[in-house]
Image (spheres, rainbow, N blue to C red):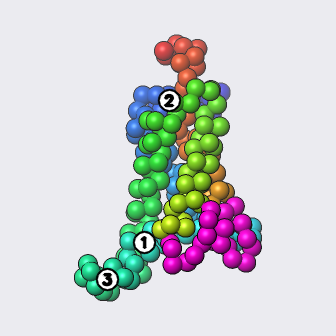
C-alpha cells in the first residue's frame, strides 16, 4: 500500500508540476542511458559515448584557428560534452511532455515513451550520426558505425534510445483524467 501511494504521489507530481517533472525525467533518463551506453561492449555492441561525440563536435580541430581555441584539456572536453549531451536529453524530455504526450491519444504512457525513443533513434541513425560525422563515412542509416559487425552499431543506437525512453516513461507518467477522478483529485 505504501509503494502504491508513493507511486501515485510521484505520478501526481507530473500533473501538478509537468515541466519540473519532465526536467527531472530528462536528467535521470539521459544519465542512466548514457552510463549504460558505456557498457554496451559487454553485450557485443559498440559503446555509445555521446558526451565524447558532443565534445568532438564542439571542439573539432578545424575550428581551433578560427575560434582561437588551441589547447583544450580532455577534462574540459568531456565535461562540456556531458553538459551539452545532458541538455539535449532534457530538451527532448520537455518536448515529449509538452508536445508528444498530449498529441498521442492512447492511454499507455510507456508505449508513447517507447515510440518517442524510436523516433529519436531514427533521427540519430539517419541524420545525427552520419551527417554530423562525415569524416567517418558512416553511410546511409549509420550502417558503417560498427564496421566489424554491420548493423550492430545501429542496434546500439536503438537500444540506447530505448533505455532513455523506458526511464523517461517510468519517471514522467502523469495520471489520466480518469485516474485523477478515481482518486478524487480531478
Callout 1: 10 Å neighbours few (<14), some, many (20+)?
A: some
Is 104 displayed left or right of 58 in the figure?
A: right
Tell me the quarter of the picture where residue 158 sits: bottom right
What residue lies at 74% left-to-right and 73% top-to-bottom? 149
Q: Which residues, given as a range, are shown in magenta?
A: 133-156
What residue lies at 55% left-to-right and 77% top-to-bottom? 136
As helix, strand or loop, the secondary structure at mark 1 comes to helix
Is 118 displayed left or right of 86 in the figure?
A: right
As helix, strand or loop, the secondary structure at mark 2 comes to helix
Q: CA distance from mark 3 to mark 1?
A: 12 Å
Q: Which residue is mark 3?
A: 64
* Rendered location of residue 5, percent (x, y): 58, 28
Q: CA distance from mark 1 to mark 2?
A: 33 Å
Tell me the quarter of the picture where residue 54 sits: bottom left
Q: Quadrant of the N terminus?
A: top right
Earlier-in-chain disc, 1 versus 2: 1
Q: How many marks?
A: 3
Q: Which residue is mark 2?
A: 102
Callout 3: 10 Å neighbours few (<14), some, many (20+)?
A: few
Q: Which residue is mark 1?
A: 57
In the image, is residue 13 part of the stretch drawn in magenta? no
Q: Is residue 4 visible?
A: yes
* Rendered location of residue 89, percent (x, y): 47, 53
Q: Is residue 33 visible?
A: no
Furthest residue in direction front, as rendered: 140
Amino acid at each position: 500500500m505504501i509503494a502504491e501511494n508513493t507511486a501515485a504521489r510521484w505520478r501526481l507530481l507530473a500533473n501538478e508540476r509537468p515541466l519540473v517533472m519532465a526536467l527531472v525525467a530528462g536528467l535521470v533518463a539521459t544519465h542512466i542511458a548514457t552510463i549504460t551506453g558505456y557498457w554496451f561492449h559487454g553485450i557485443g555492441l559498440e559503446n555509445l559515448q555521446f558526451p565524447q561525440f558532443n565534445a568532438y563536435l564542439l571542439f573539432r580541430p578545424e575550428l581551433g584557428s578560427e575560434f582561437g581555441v588551441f589547447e583544450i584539456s580532455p577534462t574540459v572536453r568531456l565535461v562540456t560534452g556531458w553538459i551539452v549531451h545532458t541538455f539535449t536529453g532534457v530538451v527532448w524530455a520537455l518536448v515529449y511532455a509538452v508536445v508528444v504526450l498530449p498529441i498521442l491519444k492512447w492511454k499507455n504512457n510507456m508505449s508513447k515513451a517507447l515510440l518517442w525513443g524510436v523516433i529519436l533513434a531514427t533521427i540519430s541513425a539517419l541524420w545525427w550520426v552520419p551527417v554530423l560525422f562525415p569524416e567517418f563515412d558512416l553511410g546511409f542509416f549509420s550502417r558503417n558505425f560498427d564496421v566489424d559487425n554491420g548493423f550492430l552499431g545501429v542496434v546500439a543506437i536503438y537500444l540506447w534510445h530505448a533505455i532513455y525512453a523506458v526511464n523517461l516513461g517510468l519517471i514522467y507518467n502523469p495520471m489520466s483524467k480518469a485516474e485523477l477522478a478515481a482518486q478524487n483529485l480531478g
